[in-house]
């Protein structure tokens, strides 16, 4: 086979289980595409694959960033590209798995990162503009300074409009300082699979998963991360903020549990909205993990055959 297989979907859709089975069938290795599972010492709250799974199939880009550090999508693409090349050089199949749509689209090349990263001042300015102006006004601003970029961005998509403005304005600043825009990376040859699951089943799975996190030590894990890095950006993640609220006496454990379930369900909806916008993705029903595995293996053997 030639190229990478990308398996994505909302939290609790069964990505890890299905990817593991697919990797065993195809002779693959798994590459993480979840922005929370990169952090060390946070396996309970992020749902990182357990040691038993990693013993069966090689896993990459999990638990390797200190929670106190910030990690960008641009750095993720750099690291994932290197790992994918390594895997292919061994004659294995790279299987990218995760729920962070921005990482996945940046890696696939549908959301290019051939621009300097925006600085904190630029982001703060754009946040302020977004509070003052409508999404339509922001789009018109983008159209005025970068018509081609605006034509590729939906007028009602405030997130992508702001990201596009950040990129265009940052690139202008870089050029005015005498710098050159970085070269565009080669587009990754890949096939993207989006896992689909009925809303009711997904809600049940999310509730079960969150209850399991609390039962297996999420509160202690959150306390340990805060002791190591009190200002860690990762502590704002699902479950961690609620666990710390309980530890600080701002919520009961039942309130923390209920809040985490609610916030995770809202996050899953946002993930589904993002993945629906990936036009060239293959949608696979994931309620039956065995059937999903068979479908993905068949698709990979057809689409990733050597050119």
Image (cartoon, rainbow, N blue to C red):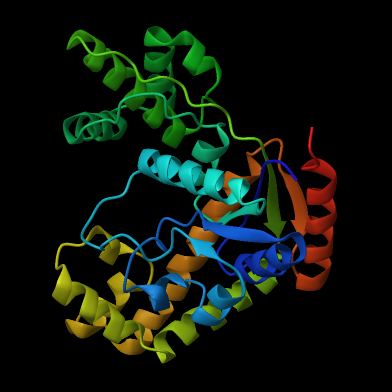
Left or right of 285: which side holds 129?
A: left
Identify which residue, 40 or 103, lies in the foreground.
40
Q: Nearer the viewer, residue 267 or 44?
A: 44
Quadrant of the drawing holding the N terminus: top right
The vertical placement of 215 against 29, above or below, is: below
Q: On screen, 258 above or below 304? A: below
Residue at the far front in the pictured view: 90
Q: Residue at x 38, y 67 (%)?
A: 238
Left or right, residue 290 beside residue 154:
right
Position of the C terminus by quadrant: top right
Residue 224 image position (x, y, % from top left): 22, 80
Residue sitting at x 60%, y 52%:
272
Toward the bottom, the furthest residue is 215
Within the image, what quadrant is residue 220 found in?
A: bottom left
Whole-percent x and y of residue 85?
55, 43
* Residue 22 shown left or right of residue 96 in the figure: right
Is 280 left, or right, of 87 in this rendering?
right
Name the residue at 60% across, 72% down: 203
Residue 18, horizontal then vertical, whole percent = 69, 67
Q: Residue 179, located in which quarter of the rendered image?
A: top left
> Which x, y percent locates residue 138?
38, 22
Residue 195 visible (yes or no):
yes
| Residue 73 image-quadrant placement | top left
Figure disc tally: 0
Q: Is residue 288 visible?
A: no
């Amino acid at each position: 086979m030639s190229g990478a297989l990308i398996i994505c979907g909302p939290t609790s859709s069964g990505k890890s289980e299905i990817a593991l089975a697919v990797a065993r069938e195809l002779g693959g290795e798994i590459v993480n595409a979840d922005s929370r599972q990169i952090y060390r010492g946070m396996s309970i709250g992020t749902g990182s694959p357990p040691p038993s799974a990693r013993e069966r199939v090689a896993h990459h880009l999990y638990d390797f960033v200190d929670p106190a550090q910030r990690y960008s999508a641009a750095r993720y693409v750099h690291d994932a590209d290197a790992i994918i090349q390594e895997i292919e050089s061994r004659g294995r199949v790279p299987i990218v798995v995760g729920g962070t749509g921005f990482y996945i689209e940046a890696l696939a090349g549908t959301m290019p990162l051939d621009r300097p990263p925006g600085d904190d001042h630029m982001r703060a300015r754009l946040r302020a503009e977004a509070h003052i102006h409508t999404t339509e006004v922001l789009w018109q601003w983008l159209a005025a300074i970068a018509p081609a970029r605006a034509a590729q961005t939906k007028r009602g998509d405030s997130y992508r409009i702001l990201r596009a403005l950040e990129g265009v304005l940052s690139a202008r600043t870089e050029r005015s300082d005498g710098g050159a825009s970085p070269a565009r990376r080669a587009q990754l040859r890949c096939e993207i699979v989006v896992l689909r699951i009925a809303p009711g089943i997904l809600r049940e799975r999310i509730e079960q998963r969150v209850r399991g996190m609390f039962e297996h030590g999420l509160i202690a894990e959150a306390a340990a991360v805060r002791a190591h890095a009190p200002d860690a950006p990762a502590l704002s993640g699902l479950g961690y903020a609620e666990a710390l609220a309980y530890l600080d006496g701002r919520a009961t454990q039942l309130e923390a549990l209920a809040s985490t379930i609610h916030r995770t369900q809202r996050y899953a909806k946002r993930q589904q909205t993002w993945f629906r916008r990936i036009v060239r993705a293959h949608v696979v029903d994931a309620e039956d993990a065995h059937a999903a595995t068979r479908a993905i293996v068949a698709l990979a053997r057809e689409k990733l055959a050597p050119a």
